[in-house]
Image: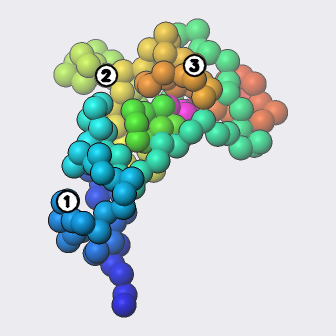
Amino acid sequence: MRRVLHDDRAWGLLINDDELFQPADSSSDSDDDDDYDGGFGGDGARRRGQQEVFWNLSDALKVDEKPLRLDDSLMGRMIYMRWDTPHGWLVGTITQRFTQETPRLAAKFNYRVRWFDGWDNHKLMLDNYQGGADAPYSSWVLLVKSGQSSDADIMSD
């Protein structure tokens, strides 16, 4: 039997036909799902079928030094940000900076980031610049190729 996968973008899940049409109170659920609450944990995150992406950098990348200020120098830079459970750490590229020239956006956000599935507006803060397995949600760092250490090195490529 051919199984069709459905992309549930709202929750970042891939589910098959059996899961799509199975009632939530089905008796075919495993014993470890006895406390299943409809897919939402206490923090509002969907739990079933998802696992958080934990801090994990390849040897080809390293965390760059914390920027001194949030300005145009971040444009085009690779960012590694920790999202709320169940998403975890994701890599993106900073593509746009919002300024007073875009007042409606600048009131709430300062940068636009392109992620693997689209883009999102963010309010990056220097106080949230931290990485590692114990970093809180909304933490972020800039990434560079191993062997590079500053903006000057990146611009010279």
The coloring applied to the image is: rainbow
Left/right of residue 105 with respect to residue 115 in the rendered view: left
- Residue sitting at x 75%, y 25%: 149
Residue underneath mark 2: 109
Mark 3 packing: few (<14 Cα in 10 Å), some, or many (20+)?
some
Q: Secondary structure at mark 1?
A: loop
Quarter of the image containing the N terminus?
Answer: bottom left
- Foreground tag (2 vs 3): 3
Q: Give the camera-side residue of 105 and 90.
A: 90
- Residue sitting at x 22%, y 49%: 38
Residue underneath mark 3: 130
Is residue 70 visible from the viewing direction of this image?
no
Mark 2 is on which residue type?
A: Phe
Is residue 30 visible from the viewing direction of this image?
yes
Residue underneath mark 1: 24
Quarter of the image containing the C terminus?
Answer: top right
Mark 1 is on which residue type?
A: Ala
Q: Position of residue 147 (x, y in %)?
A: 82, 33
Q: Give the camera-side residue of 86 and 101.
A: 86
Q: CA distance from mark 1 to mark 3?
A: 39 Å
> What are the residue bounds of the magenta stretch?
77-81
Mark 1 packing: few (<14 Cα in 10 Å), some, or many (20+)?
some
- Foreground tag (2 vs 1): 1
Res 66 quadrant in image = top right
Give the mark, 2 or 1, whose residue is nearer the N terminus. Answer: 1
Res 86 quadrant in image = top left
Q: CA distance from mark 2 to mark 3?
A: 19 Å
- Residue sitting at x 67%, y 39%: 57
Mark 3 is on which residue type?
A: Gln
